[in-house]
Amino acid sequence: MSPSPQSILIIGSGVFGLSTAWALTKRSSFDNTVITIVDDVRGASFPPGDSASVDSSRIIRPDYADPDYAELAALAQQEWRKQGDDELGGQERYTESGLLLAANESTEPKTSGMGYTKSSWENATRIANESGQAHRIRPLETPAALQRSLGVDGHPGDWGYVNELSGWANAGEGMRWLYNRVKATGRVNFVDGRAEELITDGKRVVGARMSDSGVLTAEVVFVAAGAWTGSLIDLRGRVEATAQPLGYIDISEEEFEVLAKQPVALNLSTGLFIIPPQSRVLKIARHCFGYLNPVLVETALAASPSEERKPIVVSRPLTQRDGSRNATSLPPDADQALRQALRDMSPVKGLDSRPWKETRLCWYSDTSDGNFLADWHPGWEGLFVATGDSGHAYKFLPVLGDKLVDCMAGNGGKLGEKWKWKKEAAADAGREIGGKFKGLVTMDGSRGGSPGLILQEELSGR
């Protein structure tokens, strides 16, 4: 990339895309760069409602097994904690409720939820100690201690800790705040449309062809399409779309008064978590290996100019925009798991038998190790890929764009090294083997459920 490209086209207005646009507007080297964001919002606001960035809540935590992510999250929290009406954490966009992180005993300490949880405790304590607040992080070393902390008699875990310095954000309102910030700069053009394929000229990616056959061009094409990225670029074995189950139930005013005072509760062995309510609706979710939706994609960009662009099978999101009645349905095992979370982690009895007010599938773009992918495509000029959120990017909203622009400039540091394009893709992942689609598996120790599940098969009970 030249120091000051004439134009940048950002495909996707989620956390990766929108935060990058914001960062670009704040750097003088891009003062003369035309910045365009395109996304398929269909007349609604940016980003689309089925984006992984848009929801009632997301966990905000520096509680990571990896110290580099822990440090970046702590930096982001400095912004989340600002409570002025016009600041990120204001108007109830951020609530520091505390976080109870737990795990179940395992014989695989390094790749298990328990290994992750104990490393996370060490990193969170170290960061808190730097500001003299380590006393606000307390280990809970038995199932009974975890039960007492949550006021439950189920099984929230075998070992864990509570971090009073973590919390949660109203995800949809946070994205609205960011969009308004970017829009107010007057520097970013927002285009409502669906990018169908990337267009090339020789060895260079020069733009995108839209669903209405129109074309958008730019000197730099920055693809940040989240779980849809693999439909535009062949990322098989590197990034894959997976569906994560969410359920919402109505609660009474009395139940709200109890649950709103709870910390976020997350078990990293099961992936199950409950976030305190902001209204009389309670959200329950599972951070898991996820469900796959393999479909034939006709126009994904090949690995290099020397390779022919041909149809490939990839996992692609299935959302309400696709018009499918299954877009918000939960597979039976997911329904059961979310209800188990209520039995194990909610102090209010009987919620597990309550009907769902709403259910949803949140689509991650997963990588094999849970690290983001943020790098120039090695096979094409002019193409930067920023994806692989792996279900944990939202908390970095106020700082992620700056890091991504650093990566574009070749100054990504330790995180940039983690986010680099890997020389080898995961073997056979994202391909059909013997007539069965084999999914990419994220092995960072933070996932519950079973890997390799096909969404339509699970919905039909096969």
Image: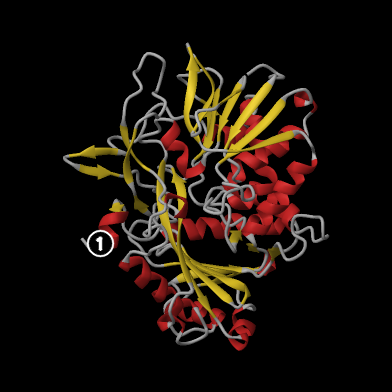
Judging depth in this view, the residue of 262 and 104 nearest the camera is 262
Judging depth in this view, the residue of 289 and 221 nearest the camera is 221
- Please name the residue shown 52% across and 84% down the image: 347
In which quarter of the view is residue 257 placed? bottom right
In the figure, is residue 96 to the left or right of 138?
right
- In the orientation shown, which residue stands out farthest toward the top? 202
Residue 191, percent from left and from top: 63, 37
| Residue density around tag 1, few if under 14, some if 14–19, many if 20 or more, within 10 Å | few
In the figure, is residue 378 to the left or right of 83?
left
- Number of labels in the image equals 1
- Please name the residue shown 79% across and 43% down the image: 184
- Please name the residue shown 75% across and 42% down the image: 183
Question: Is label 1 in a helix, a strand or a loop?
Answer: helix
- Please name the residue shown 35% across and 72% down the image: 336
Judging depth in this view, the residue of 93 and 262 nearest the camera is 93
Q: Quadrant of the N terminus?
A: top right
- In the orientation shown, which residue stands out farthest toward the front? 212
Q: Which residue matches tag 1?
A: 460
Residue 401, percent from left and from top: 66, 39
Task: Answer yes or no: is residue 73 visible.
Answer: yes
Q: Quadrant of the C terminus?
A: bottom left
Q: At label 1, which amino acid type do we have?
A: Ser
Question: Vertical placement of 370 versus 251: above or below?
Answer: above
Residue 337, percent from left and from top: 37, 70
